[in-house]
């Protein structure tokens, strides 16, 4: 009887030992899995912060300095100002190389939103010599159009997204150009006071 009792005891001890070993393994796995999940979540948060910072840096620096033509005009006459800009050979001859972007800044917009000071030009880093510099603070602006190719209807719809009940500090269009000077993508931003 002692033999059977000792076999039963040995069997019971082995079962308890392996049960504890397996239970510990599950606990260890759960602990490791939680640690890994926390690390992955933290890495994802860090990546999102880095990506967000990179996106902001890709959009534009906080202060853009432009050289070009500036005029207080009726917004319906913007094509006339574009014509003057396109014919401004003196400005275009001062370019260091083929420009990558053209900026259009609408500032000092009238209360009825019919007139504004409009600047069309290049970043001063792309020009060898310039007389007047026009600054645009881009630190607190909202995206109306992310960078991509748009037709005239999409650009007009972006203007409709502006909250005209707020005081507008500026509206900024950035037109990305290809090697031939053709617009490949446009971005549009608004900054409220």
Image: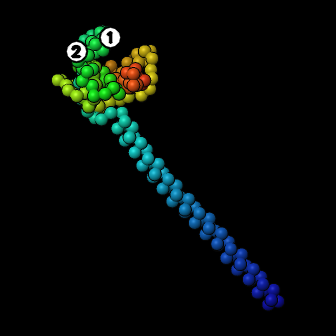
> Of the numbered discs in the image, which one, if any, rests on residue 49?
none
- Image spot of residue 118 (x, y percent): 26, 18
Q: Secondary structure at mark 1?
A: helix
- Image spot of residue 64 (x, y percent): 26, 30
Q: Quadrant of the N terminus?
A: bottom right
Instruction: Report the colour scheme.
Output: rainbow
Residue annotated with mark 1: 79
Foreground pick, 96 / 55: 96
Task: Classify residue 127 by image quadrant.
Answer: top left
Residues under numbered marks 2 and 1 in contact, where contact means CB atoms less than 8 Å apart: no
Q: Secondary structure at mark 2?
A: strand
Asked if residue 36 lies left or right of residue 175, the reply is right
- Evaluate whether residue 192 shows in this view: no
Q: Earlier in the sequence, mark 2 or mark 1?
A: 2
Task: Classify residue 77 by image quadrant.
Answer: top left
At 59% from the left and 65% from the top, the residue drawn is: 27
At 39% from the left and 25% from the top, the residue drawn is: 179
Q: Quadrant of the C terminus?
A: top left
Residue 172 versus residue 10 in the image, above or below: above
- Image spot of residue 24 (x, y percent): 61, 69
Give the residue at the far bottom of this rendering. Answer: 2
At 25% from the left and 21% from the top, the residue drawn is: 93
Task: Classify residue 174 by image quadrant.
Answer: top left
- Evaluate whether residue 53 shows in this view: yes
Foreground pick, 158 / 84: 84
Residue annotated with mark 2: 71
- Image spot of residue 165 (x, y percent): 32, 20
Asked if residue 82 lies left or right of residue 183, the reply is left
């Amino acid at each position: 009887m002692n033999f059977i009792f000792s076999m039963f005891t040995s069997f019971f001890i082995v079962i308890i030992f392996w049960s504890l070993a397996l239970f510990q393994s599950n606990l260890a796995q759960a602990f490791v899995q939680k640690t890994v999940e926390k690390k992955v979540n933290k890495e994802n948060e860090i990546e999102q912060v880095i990506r967000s910072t990179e996106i902001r840096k890709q959009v534009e620096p906080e202060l853009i300095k432009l050289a070009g033509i500036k005029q207080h005009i009726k917004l319906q006459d913007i094509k006339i100002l574009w014509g003057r800009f396109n014919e401004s050979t003196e400005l275009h001859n001062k370019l260091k190389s083929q420009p990558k972007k053209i900026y259009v800044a609408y500032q000092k917009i009238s209360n009825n939103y019919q007139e504004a000071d409009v600047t069309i030009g290049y970043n001063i880093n792309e020009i060898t010599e310039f007389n007047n510099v026009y600054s645009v603070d881009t630190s607190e602006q909202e995206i109306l159009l992310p960078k991509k190719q748009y037709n005239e209807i999409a650009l007009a719809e972006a203007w409709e997204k502006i909250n005209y009940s707020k005081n507008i500090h500026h509206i900024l269009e950035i037109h990305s150009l290809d090697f031939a000077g053709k617009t490949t993508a446009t971005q549009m931003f608004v900054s409220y006071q």
